[in-house]
Image: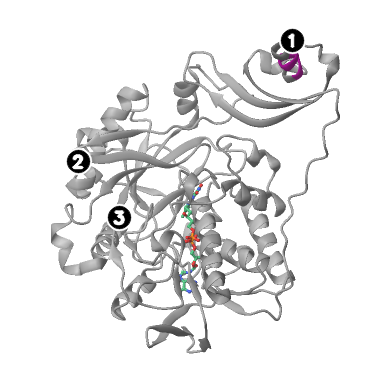
Amino acid sequence: MVKEIQVRVNLVEQRIEDILKKKAARSLKISSKNITAVKVLRKSIDARKKETIFNYKLAVYINEPIPETPDYIFNYKDVSNAKEVHIIGFGPAGMYAALRCIELGFKPIVLERGKNVQDRRRDLRAINQFHTVNEDSNYCFGEGGAGTYSDGKLYTRSLKRGDVRRIFENLVYHGATEQILIDAHPHIGTNKLPKIIQNIRETILKYGGEVHFETRVSDFVVSNNKMKAIILKDGTEIPVSAVVLATGHSARDIFELLHKKDIQIKAKSFAMGVRVEHPQELIDQIQYSCSGQRDELLPAAAYSLVHQVNNRGVYSFCMCPGGFIVPAATANGEVVVNGMSPSRRNNKFANSGIVVEINVEKDLPKYQQFGELKGLQFQKDLEKLAFNAGGKSQVAPAQRLTDFVEGRLSNSLNDTSYQPGLNSSPLHSLLPKIIGGRLRKGFAAFGKKMHGYYTNEANIVGVESRTSSPVSIPRKENLEHPQIEGLYPCGEGAGYAGGIISAAMDGERCAEAVIAKYTS
Ligand code: FAD
């Protein structure tokens, strides 16, 4: 017999050998001798009270053996000679669109402007050390997309959008640990992601799909409102039947191209702000109510904060415990920051985006002349402002947190994980009021929710501007663009995802939509 139960374990109990079996026996009022195995189905940590509790959901096997761990099976077919689906972009949306095509018996041909994960590393080093941004290969562009050199957080709020579990099992199939199926807040880590992404590429190639790196799409041929061909940067023209456009939120040239060709796009509300960086030990002390270092059984603590200021949300985004702030610009002349963590989250800093909702209709009166590209233009201007304030390199403008809120320049800054370096700048007066003013009120409120958070031991670093896409690309119920037959806008850049998992799910949905049309 197998029974599912929930048990709570405190930190002292967590150290006791076989504690889960003992708790299970007590909970089920049976002898632990009758328990053949205990399998953890779900694990979460609750640190809201003085005592930190591990919550477990367990499957308890009573007088019967535990079945072998299932292999996660995906029924990939040989698609070498099958009908083709062209996919632009090899981020999570493009990768999962390609895998789904293979499962359904169609041949994905992926075109990706960036390099493979190994070669991409060299370009990241060039940004960090020499402040040179390769416009095709950087923290946003290249194999695995923006999700490769990230924290690899795998949670999503979009539970309705598809089968999250399927995406997780696919990651395990390609080399992620099974722990991601158990943890309430799973993450993979930037040191482990490249191998998993390489394995995904190898699956695609093994079954007859194609992945072309350093292949930037620069135009489309549309005739009679039908997608006819893709044109590459080198002028090559590739005839197509269907195109999954999964180019992400940083592919500004694609948004501009669609706009120029009168292919409908739409300005959408998005969020921008700064990254804040605290010592991880301080965040641990606040979240675990401890002094000194956290208990070794506890992971680096995370937080999630939100506050309403003048009818706009100010909130934490992509919090990276034990992580690094990274330069995520996609062109020279701009400074953009984001965050990533290794799998052990063992760096000494905790960073998080703290961003403000921007309503493109109400908050940007001076940008209305840019039409559907108004949010994009505002984003560009802010990134240029950060570039100038940092000193015209990848050095980022920064300020101590309380100095920012109280409106004075910082005489010195705290240590940072941001490799290109920081330049003390008056961000309180440089940032537009709709962002700076709201952030200042938001940070003060966060200090009341998390005592110790509002401190000059933290830096804020500008600007966190690529949290979401300032443009969406419309699509019909069958996921095709309303004007162009054969064009399937997909993933975060089109406005249908907000993270690795939701982008992957949207990739699968778009592949299914293309194939539904092929086979109807
Ligand atoms: P992208 O990942 O942006 O992929 C688009 C791809 O298209 C890119 O590889 C790009 O090179 C390619 N492309 C663009 N234009 C062209 C063209 N013209 N021709 C050919 N190819 C083109 N999300 C999480 O859920 N968890 C996290 O921990 C997390 N951390 C992050 C950390 C960082 C540093 C960054 C930058 C992002 C992070 N995100 C995280 C966000 C996440 O990475 C994105 O939501 C996700 O990658 C979006 O997937 P996508 O496939 O829609 O687009």
Q: Is residue 24 magenta?
A: yes
Q: Is residue 169 above or below residue 49?
A: below
Residue plotted at (21% across, 32% down): 406
Residue plotted at (48% across, 67% down): 246
Q: How many marks?
A: 3
Name the quadrant containing residue 142.
bottom right
Q: Could you say where residue 309 lies in the image, as x and y percent from the top left?
A: 22, 36
Secondary structure, mark 3, is: helix
Which residue is label 3 attached to? 386
Residue plotted at (44% across, 41% down): 416
Q: Could you say where residue 2 lies in the image, as x and y percent from the top left?
A: 76, 27
Name the quadrant containing residue 343.
top right
Chain-order first, disc 1 or disc 2: 1
**Amino acid type shown at disc 1:** Lys
**Amino acid type shown at disc 3:** Ala
- 105 sits left or right of 346 in the view: right
Q: Is residue 226 above or below residue 351?
A: below
Nearer to the camera, 212 or 483: 483
Considering the image in quadrants, where does the N terminus appear? Answer: top right
Tell which tag, 1 or 2, sits nearer the viewer: 1
Identify the main secondary structure in magenta: helix
Secondary structure, mark 1, is: loop
Q: CA distance from mark 1 to mark 3?
A: 63 Å
Q: Which mark is residue 437?
A: 2
Name the quadrant containing residue 115.
bottom right
Task: Report the span colored magenta.
Answer: 21-25
* Any part of residue 249 in sight: no
Q: CA distance from mark 3 to mark 2?
A: 17 Å
**Amino acid type shown at disc 2:** Gly
Which residue is label 1 attached to? 29
Secondary structure, mark 2, is: helix
Considering the image in quadrants, where does the C terminus appear? Answer: bottom right
